[in-house]
Amino acid sequence: MGKVIVYPTDTIYGLGCSALDKKAVGKIYRIKNRAKKKPLLVLISDFKMLQEYFKVDKNSWHICAKFGREKYR
């Protein structure tokens, strides 16, 4: 719990943690000196995971379906 990782991307290094770990998310905000009002990026693996963790309105589903590889429900 509370662990933060550093990972390379094609341009810079990123900071990451479990989005469900409030302690680790707080660490990233402190490390980056980022305002709490500025959201962090959350990576998901598929539409099923999107549905599990987020509420998505109908219009947003259409956008996801247009650019995603999967069909939405």
Image (tube, helix red, strand yellow):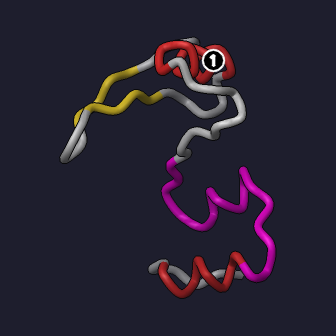
Q: Is residue 72 left or right of residue 68?
A: right
Quadrant position of residue 63: bottom right
Residue 3, given in percent of the width and then of the height, sits at 49, 14
Quadrant position of residue 36: top right
Image quadrant containing the N terminus: top right
Please give the name of the residue rendered at 49% of the width and 57% of the height, measured from the top-left corner: 45
SS of the residue at dot 1?
helix
Q: Is residue 45 left or right of residue 25?
A: left
Please give the name of the residue rendered at 64% of the width and 23% of the height, measured from the top-left corner: 21
Depth order, front residue of 52/15? 15
Q: Residue furthest left?
A: 10
Please give the name of the residue rendered at 53% of the width and 44% of the height, measured from the top-left corner: 41
Residue 18, given in percent of the width and then of the height, sits at 55, 30
Q: Is residue 2 left or right of residue 61?
A: left
Q: Is residue 37 magenta?
A: no
Q: Which residue type carries mark 1?
A: Gly
Please give the name of the residue rendered at 52% of the width and 21% of the height, measured from the top-left corner: 28
Q: Residues within 10 Å of mark 1 (few under 14, many from 20)?
A: some
Q: Compared with residue 37, is residue 52 higher up or lower down, i.e. above or below?
A: below
- Residue receiving disc 1: 26
Q: Compared with residue 57, is residue 1 higher up or lower down, i.e. above or below?
A: above
Residue span colored magenta: 43-59
Number of marks drawn: 1
Image quadrant containing the C terminus: bottom right
